[in-house]
Image (cartoon, helix red, strand yellow):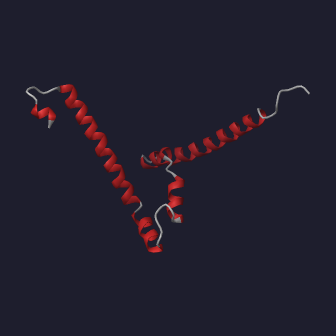
Amino acid sequence: MSLVAQSEFDVLFGTMYALCCMIEMSMVASHLIWLLRTKGIRRRAKEAGVGFDDFGEGREWQSKGIDLDKKFLEIIGRRNEAEKHDTADEVFSMETEAANKKNTIPKVLV
């Protein structure tokens, strides 16, 4: 309303207000999506008489996270690449662990 009440329209502030509105609406949309995805878990937690955060299934759901790379590859139909991606991550984690073990020996003369 402050932009409308002025004698002339300020494009910079109008753009900033529009961006702020988009950010706020994306937060609302994100929360609504979370509510829809957890509807069943929240219902079961209510039946058990505990809150979502105290319910075992709710904790498990929150801790597992989402593998966005794998989901994206599944959506576009490249399942073989998703499987290759998983094995590449396993090899990389093994190499990283091996490199970390090499560096755990102190380089000190006794």
Q: Position of residue 31 (x, y in %)?
A: 36, 52
Q: Residue furthest left?
A: 7
x, y percent for residue 100: 73, 36
The answer to whether residue 62 is left or right of residue 108 is left
Residue 17, by quadrant, is top left
Determine the residue positioned at 49% across, 60% down.
Answer: 53
Q: Is residue 6 left or right of residue 62?
A: left
Q: Nearer the viewer, residue 71 or 37?
A: 37
Position in image of residue 92 (x %, y %) = 65, 38
In this view, the residue in front, 5 or 97, is 5
| Residue at image location 44% in from the left, 48% down from the top | 77
Q: Measuring 36% from the left and 49% from the top, which residue is drawn there?
A: 30
> Residue 12, image x and y in percent?
22, 26
Q: Residue, x 45% and y 70% (percent of image)? A: 44
Q: Quadrant of residue 9?
A: top left
Observer-nearest of 9 and 2: 2
For residue 24, above or below residue 99 = below
Specify whether 108 is left or right of 92. right
- In the displayed structure, would residue 72 be above or below residue 9? below
Q: Quadrant of residue 90?
A: top right
User: Quadrant location of the N terminus?
Assistant: top left
